[in-house]
Image (spheres, grey):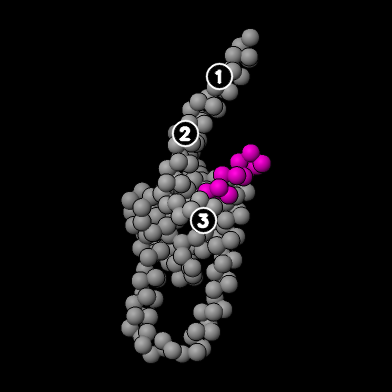
C-alpha cells in the first residue's frame, strides 16, 4: 500500500451539518426571532405557537420536550416571558452570544413598533378604522393564547390524577387572587417532594423486587 493510499484511508469525511444540533449563524438566530417578534400580538404566550413552528418544527433547534421545559423555566423567572424564553433558547444554542442574538431579535420589533406608535399616536388615536382593526385582532389573540395552553396540557401528560392541578391553580389565581408566584413555588416544591420521596420509594421497591 502506498503512502498516498494510506493518507486517503485516514481522511475523515466530515459529518453533514445538522441544523437541529444548534446549527445556524447568529444572523439566523436574530432574523428568526425578529420575525417572531414582529408577528407577536397579545403578549408572550401568543408567541409560543410561532416559536414552536420556527424553532421546533422548521429549524429543529430544540425538541418538543425541551420546549416544554424552557417554557416552564421562562415562566418561573422574573422578567418578560417572551424575552426570557428567547434568551434561554439562544443560550442553549450558542451560549452567551446566541442569547444576545435571540434576545435582540425578539425585543427590537416591539421597541420599534411602540416607538412609532408613541410618535404618531395622537394622529390616529380617535381613528375609527384603527379602532376597528384592534377590535378584530382581539379574538384572534385569544385563540393564539388558547392553542398553546391545550398543547402544553397534552405534552405535560395530564391525566385524571393530575388534571386537578391546573384547574385548582387557575381557580386560586382567578377567584382567590393568589399570586402566581406562590403557585409556582408550591408546584415546584410539590414536584420535588413527589420525585424525592413518593417516586423514589416506588423505584426502590421495584428494584428490590427485581433483586429478589
Q: Are marks 2 and 3 in contact (CB under 8 Å)?
A: no
- The earlier-in-sequence mark between 3 and 1 is 3
Which of pointers 2 and 3 indicates the residue nearer the eye? 3
Residue 177 x, y percent position in the rendering: 45, 55
Q: Is residue 179 above or below residue 134?
A: above
- Assign the C terminus to one quadrant of the image: top right
**Which of the numbered marks, if any, corresponds to residue 24?**
none
Pointer 1 residue: 204
Q: Looking at the picture, how far across and down is residue 209, in whole percent?
A: 63, 14
Q: What is the magenta range?
A: 157-170
| Observer-nearest of 58 and 161 | 161
Q: Nearer the viewer, residue 14 or 142?
A: 142
Q: Is residue 172 above or below residue 46?
A: above
Residue at the image point whose x is 51% and y is 88% from the top: 129
Report the mark closest to the observer, 3 or 1. 3
Labels in figure, total: 3
For the residue pair 9 and 212, the one nearer the viewer reads as 212
Residue that badge 2 annotates: 192
Dot 2: what SS?
helix
Mark 2, other Cα within 10 Å: few <14 / some 14–19 / many ≥20: few
Q: State the mark number for residue 175.
A: 3
Q: CA distance from mark 3 to mark 1?
A: 41 Å
Amino acid at each position: 500500500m502506498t503512502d498516498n493510499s494510506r493518507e486517503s484511508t485516514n481522511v475523515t469525511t466530515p459529518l453533514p451539518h445538522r441544523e437541529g444540533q444548534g446549527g445556524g449563524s447568529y444572523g439566523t438566530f436574530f432574523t428568526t426571532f425578529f420575525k417572531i417578534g414582529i408577528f407577536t400580538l397579545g403578549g408572550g404566550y401568543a408567541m409560543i405557537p410561532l416559536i414552536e413552528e420556527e424553532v421546533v418544527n422548521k429549524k429543529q433547534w430544540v425538541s418538543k420536550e425541551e420546549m416544554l421545559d424552557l417554557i416552564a423555566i421562562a415562566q418561573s423567572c422574573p422578567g418578560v416571558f417572551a424575552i426570557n424564553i428567547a434568551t434561554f433558547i439562544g443560550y442553549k444554542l450558542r451560549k452567551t452570544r446566541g442569547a444576545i442574538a435571540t434576545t435582540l431579535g425578539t425585543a427590537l420589533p416591539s421597541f420599534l413598533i411602540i416607538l412609532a406608535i408613541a410618535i404618531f399616536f395622537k394622529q390616529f388615536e380617535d381613528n375609527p378604522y384603527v379602532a376597528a382593526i384592534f377590535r378584530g385582532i382581539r379574538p384572534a389573540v385569544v385563540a393564539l393564547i388558547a392553542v398553546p395552553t391545550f398543547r402544553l396540557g397534552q405534552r405535560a401528560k395530564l391525566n385524571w390524577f393530575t388534571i386537578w392541578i391546573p384547574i385548582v391553580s387557575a381557580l386560586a389565581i382567578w377567584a382567590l387572587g393568589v399570586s402566581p408566584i406562590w403557585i409556582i413555588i408550591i408546584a415546584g416544591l410539590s414536584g420535588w417532594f413527589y420525585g424525592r420521596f413518593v417516586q423514589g420509594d416506588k423505584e426502590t421497591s421495584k428494584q428490590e423486587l427485581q433483586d429478589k
